[in-house]
Image: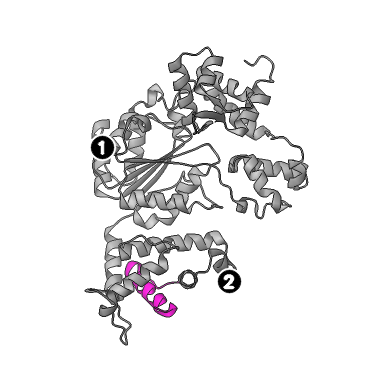
């Protein structure tokens, strides 16, 4: 196949799916990918951002995957099309109307397809409530994670997905980008925030009212109606800030008494057969993740770490771009930390990253301090003891090291370590012995804002 045949073939598939031909940028993505150009090459040629090209390409690969029945990505685009072309070459006929025949399937019936699309749009009423969904201005390099979400939801029909990690790792941005790219794939999309938690009864009522004109009185009947909705329509429901329904001062992921009903609700969502998906965004793992087996329950989790990408700093007024990766590494690629530190560097250091790094210290700004104080106060007393001890050590510590130094029972120590891992505040280092270390930023906070504060511990 030459590039013109490829463009014509892909255009036919896009028309089949959408009723519209490839636009200029889509054609550029197809042509550039076929010729092994990078997204950056395409972006420069068309005077758009690399991220925008990536978004357009992602949507195109998703569409082609559905039309061709196999997973299409940038790296395998050429091989997939050559294979499809080779298999169907005996059945392909290009006539005056440029009709493609792939096996027994006619690929070019645009008028018929447009009629089908119009009919489907009339019969499928879309109900979206994205009032509480944030607007994402910048999105950085999470294509692998987007692919995972797509695979779980569209190919594996996973019913409960958790997106987990500290604030600043891009959990909400990732999910919102997934929603923006896949609006047309769902009949109902609802984004709910638990920043100010509400009872399950009220939550179910709010989920139903967007698409159900008449609601039953009892919570049991409302729940049955919700399950019917999840079965009859392809729904995507997002709960953001799930950690706010968990108890502060106890181990991670323990539900507050007023919100215990959510625990049973999430379990039922994974057990009952339906075609919809829930995405839970949280800074803490919840108990179901530990006691439910993914082999038997329709659930998956996606844990996000920081982003090590210098695009974060572009157009922010900083100099010495060769130092950016050093700054990113210092603050663990956490966008929440970095955005505040960048503002500090601009205000105090004239935007000069090297002068900031010359201070040879990890600066905890007031904003970061406020956030980490909230995290520390959520810890159980056992977790606080463990954190305070680890923060004093320059070495990574094993369970035995901690057992010898702390007056904790074996059970309390193990449960405390597990809870800190579930909060993403300590990390395991695998080797002959399992060692534990604190997140560097959190360790700096504990050393200088807890241990050095009068009357603290």
Q: Nearer the viewer, residue 334 or 173?
A: 334
Q: Nearer the viewer, residue 196 or 449?
A: 449
Residue 240 image-quadrant placement: top left
Q: In this figure, what is the number of numbered marks?
A: 2
Dot 1, how many residues are within 10 Å of its Cα: few (below 14), some (14-19), or many (20+)? some
Q: Is 20 a magenta residue?
A: yes
**Residue at 50% in and 60% down:** 54
Mark 1 → mark 2, Cα distance in angstroms? 50 Å
The figure's colour scheme reads one colour
Q: Residue at x 36, y 35 (%)?
A: 203
Task: Please name the residue shown 26% across and 59% down the image.
Answer: 123
Nearer to the camera, 311 or 188: 311
Residue 266 is covered by the magenta coloring: no
- The answer to whether residue 187 of the structure is visible from this angle is no
Residue, far top? 407
Q: Which mark is residue 45?
A: 2
Q: Is residue 392 above or below residue 37?
A: above
Residue 218, position as x, y percentages in the image:
25, 31
Give the magenta range.
1-24
In the rendered image, the quadrant that contains the N terminus is bottom left
Q: Which mark is residue 218?
A: none
Q: Secondary structure at mark 1?
A: helix
On the picture, is 133 further left or further right than 67?
A: right
In the image: residue 252, left or right of residue 292: right
**For residue 195, above or below residue 399:** below
Return the x and y of residue 65 as percentages of the image width and height. 35, 62
Pointer 1: what residue?
Answer: 271
């Amino acid at each position: 196949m030459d590039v013109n045949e490829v463009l014509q073939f892909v255009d036919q598939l896009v028309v089949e799916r959408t009723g519209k031909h490839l636009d200029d940028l889509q054609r550029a993505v197809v042509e550039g990918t076929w010729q092994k150009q990078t997204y950056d090459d395409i972006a420069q040629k068309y005077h758009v951002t690399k991220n925008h090209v990536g978004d357009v390409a992602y949507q195109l690969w998703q569409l082609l995957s559905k039309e061709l029945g196999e997973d299409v990505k940038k790296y395998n685009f050429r091989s997939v099309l050559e294979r499809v072309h080779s298999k169907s070459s005996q059945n392909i006929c290009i006539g005056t109307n440029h009709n493609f025949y792939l096996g027994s399937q006619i690929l070019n019936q645009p008028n018929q397809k447009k009629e089908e699309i119009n009919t489907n749009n009339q019969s499928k009423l879309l109900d979206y409530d994205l009032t509480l969904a944030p607007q994402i201005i910048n999105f950085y390099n999470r294509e692998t994670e987007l692919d995972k979400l797509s695979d779980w939801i569209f190919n594996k029909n996973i019913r409960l997905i958790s997106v987990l990690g500290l604030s600043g790792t891009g959990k909400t941005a990732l999910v919102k980008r997934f929603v923006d790219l896949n609006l047309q794939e769902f009949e109902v999309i609802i984004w709910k925030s638990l920043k100010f938690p509400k009872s399950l009864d009220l939550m179910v009522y709010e989920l139903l009212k967007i698409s159900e004109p008449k609601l039953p009185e009892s919570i049991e009947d409302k729940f049955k109606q919700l399950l019917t909705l999840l079965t009859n329509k392809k729904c995507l429901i997002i709960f953001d800030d799930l950690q706010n329904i968990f108890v502060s001062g106890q181990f991670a992921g323990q539900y507050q008494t007023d919100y215990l009903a959510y625990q049973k609700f999430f379990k039922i969502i994974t057990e009952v057969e339906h075609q919809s998906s829930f995405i839970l965004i949280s800074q803490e793992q919840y108990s179901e993740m530990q006691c439910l087996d993914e082999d038997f329950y329709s659930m998956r989790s996606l844990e996000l770490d920081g982003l090590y990408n210098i695009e974060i700093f572009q157009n922010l007024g900083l100099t010495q771009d060769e130092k950016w990766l050093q700054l990113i590494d210092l603050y663990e690629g956490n966008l929440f930390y970095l955005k505040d530190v960048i503002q500090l560097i601009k205000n105090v250091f004239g935007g000069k990253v090297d002068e900031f790094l010359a201070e040879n210290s990890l600066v905890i700004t007031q904003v970061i301090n406020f956030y980490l104080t909230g995290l520390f106060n959520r810890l159980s007393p056992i977790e606080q003891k463990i954190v305070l001890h680890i923060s004093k050590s320059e070495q990574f510590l094993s369970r035995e090291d901690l057992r010898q130094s702390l007056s904790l029972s074996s059970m309390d120590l193990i449960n405390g370590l597990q809870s800190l891992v579930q909060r993403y505040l300590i990390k395991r280092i695998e080797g002959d012995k399992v060692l534990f270390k604190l997140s560097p930023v959190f360790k700096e906070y504990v050393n200088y804002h807890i241990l050095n504060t009068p009357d603290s511990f």
